[in-house]
């Protein structure tokens, strides 16, 4: 299979110097894993950290890609809920599933947590034709959602949901400020806060303010203005 690989860190942020398309064997599943043919993969800032080798020296050689969606082509013998042909998207948060945080439903606080496609490897991420993940790290894609939409939603949607619903515990009628509303996390933040019946103020640069309103924000504020915070408070 083809895979996008690098085996050294970039020293000048010219990532084209280190990225190579390589031929690698198609992975075989461990008993608890599924193999899926990648149909769409989204870019993520952790790809850049990985190629820089900072702030973490991630394993080399490396395949990046935390957000990948595709069709399952093989499952391990212990897999119970996913079958060949299922459309799935990665859940890149790999936690130990046995510590107190994990069993309390706070897997993001797991001390052994790793981010798939970033901290995993060597050669374990989504930018390749076939990849493998534990059954618990894939989610079936609902009807009507494309591979591209699912891949784009994976980490950004989960991050937003965790912040607003898991941590902030937003309630109907509250006023929510989404700073950087035009980012992936911000886009979902606006929609989640509206879903929960909140009033949403979102900030972005001037050319993106209309998009914030299209996504459902009640107010859009230009955060390049020096006194943008006064506009929010008014
Ligand atoms: Zn844990």
Image (spheres, helix red, strand yellow):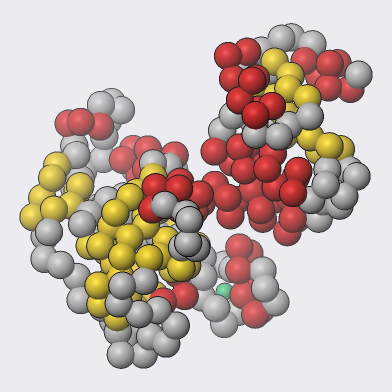
Q: Residue at x 61, y 37 (%)?
A: 187
Q: Nearer the viewer, residue 205 or 167?
A: 205
**Quadrant, the C terminus:** top right
Q: Residue at x 61, y 17 (%)?
A: 205
Q: Residue at x 37, y 57 (%)?
A: 69
Q: Residue at x 84, y 37 (%)?
A: 199
The spot of residue 87 in percent (x, y) is: 38, 65
Q: On the image, which quarter does residue 191 sit in?
A: top right
Q: Is residue 107 above or below residue 59?
A: below
Extreme residue toward the front, this view? 144
Please indicate whether residue 64 sits to the left or right of residue 90 in the image.
left
Q: Is residue 138 above or below residue 62?
A: below
Extreme residue toward the left, this view? 23
**Quadrant, the N terminus:** bottom left
Q: On the image, which quarter does residue 194 sit in?
A: top right
Quarter of the rendered structure image containing ligand 1:
bottom right
The spot of residue 13 in percent (x, y) is: 30, 28
Q: Is residue 35 above or below residue 159?
A: below
The spot of residue 20 in percent (x, y) is: 14, 42
């Amino acid at each position: 299979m083809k895979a996008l690989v690098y085996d050294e860190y970039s020293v000048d942020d010219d990532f084209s110097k280190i990225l190579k398309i390589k031929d690698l064997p198609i992975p075989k599943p461990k008993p608890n894993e599924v193999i899926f043919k990648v149909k769409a993969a989204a870019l993520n800032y952790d790809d850049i950290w990985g190629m820089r080798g900072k702030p973490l020296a991630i394993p080399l050689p490396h395949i990046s890609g935390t957000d990948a969606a595709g069709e399952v082509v093989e499952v391990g013998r212990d897999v119970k809920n996913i079958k060949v042909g299922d459309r799935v998207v990665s859940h890149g948060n790999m936690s130990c599933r046995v510590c107190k945080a994990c069993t309390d439903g706070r897997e993001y606080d797991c001390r052994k947590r790793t981010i798939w496609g970033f901290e995993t490897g060597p050669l374990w991420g989504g930018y390749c034709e076939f990849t493998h993940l534990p059954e618990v790290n894939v989610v079936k894609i609902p009807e009507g959602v494309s591979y591209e939409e699912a891949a784009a939603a994976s980490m950004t949607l989960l991050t937003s949901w965790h912040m607003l619903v898991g941590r902030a515990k937003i309630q109907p009628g509250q006023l929510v400020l989404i700073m950087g509303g035009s980012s992936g996390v911000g886009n979902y933040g606006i929609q989640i806060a509206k879903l929960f019946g909140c009033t949403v103020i979102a900030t972005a640069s001037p050319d993106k303010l209309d998009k914030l309103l299209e996504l459902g924000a009640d107010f859009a504020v230009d955060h390049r203005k020096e006194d943008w915070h006064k506009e929010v408070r008014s």
